[in-house]
Amino acid sequence: MPYALALGLTLLVEVPLYSAALPALGRVRPGRALIAAVLVNCLTHPVLWWFLTSGFPSAARATGTTSAAYPVALSLSEGVVWLAEALLLRYGLRLRGPLPYAVALTANAASLLLGLLLTG
């Protein structure tokens, strides 16, 4: 899948989720929620994409690991992205408690699921 398509699908899934959940549950103004949704994805998605398409395969070749390690790399990197987005929401929008973590987990799980369904 080309990068632009992957980013577009991620934004198509995650932005509406963030934009609905943050105002409803966190009393974040809708405009701020929309901007935050786009921003967190524009900060994390390129890094994740690079790691999974360039960084991890290079490391896999250098260390002799096989593609069987890819699901582990994907899981760990998605976990890092989830935490990064949650922390960006927490501090950027001054949210407290579990809300930024729950919303980021939901949004990232939804976009990951769509990606897995589309790519097999």
Image (cartoon, rainbow, N blue to C red):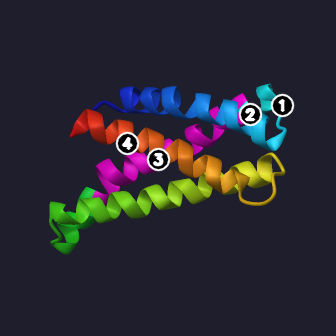
Marks 4/3 in contact by CB < 8 Å: the verdict is yes
How many residues crowd mark 4 within 10 Å: few (<14), some (14–19), many (20+)? few
Going from N to C along the chain, the mark reached first, 1 or 4, is: 1
Label 3 SS: helix
Q: Position of residue 69 (x, y in %)?
A: 23, 66
Q: Which mark is residue 113?
A: 4
**Pair 3/2: label in front:** 3
Is residue 46 visible in the rendered image? The answer is: no
Q: Which residue is mark 2?
A: 33
Q: What are the residue bounds of the magenta stretch? A: 34-56
Give how far apart the Cα atoms at labels 3 and 2 are.
19 Å
Q: Position of residue 75 (x, y in %)?
A: 38, 60
Residue type (three-letter) at the residue carrying disc 1: Arg
Q: Which residue is mark 3?
A: 109
Marks 2/1 in contact by CB < 8 Å: the verdict is yes
Label 2 SS: helix
Give how far apart the Cα atoms at labels 2 and 1 are.
6 Å
Q: Which residue is mark 1?
A: 29
Give how far apart the Cα atoms at labels 1 and 3 are.
24 Å
What's the residue at 31%, 65% (across, down)? 72
How many residues crowd mark 2 within 10 Å: few (<14), some (14–19), many (20+)? many
Label 4 SS: helix
What's the residue at 33%, 62% (across, down)? 73
Q: Quadrant of residue 33?
A: top right
**Pair 4/2: label in front:** 4
The N terminus - image quarter: top left
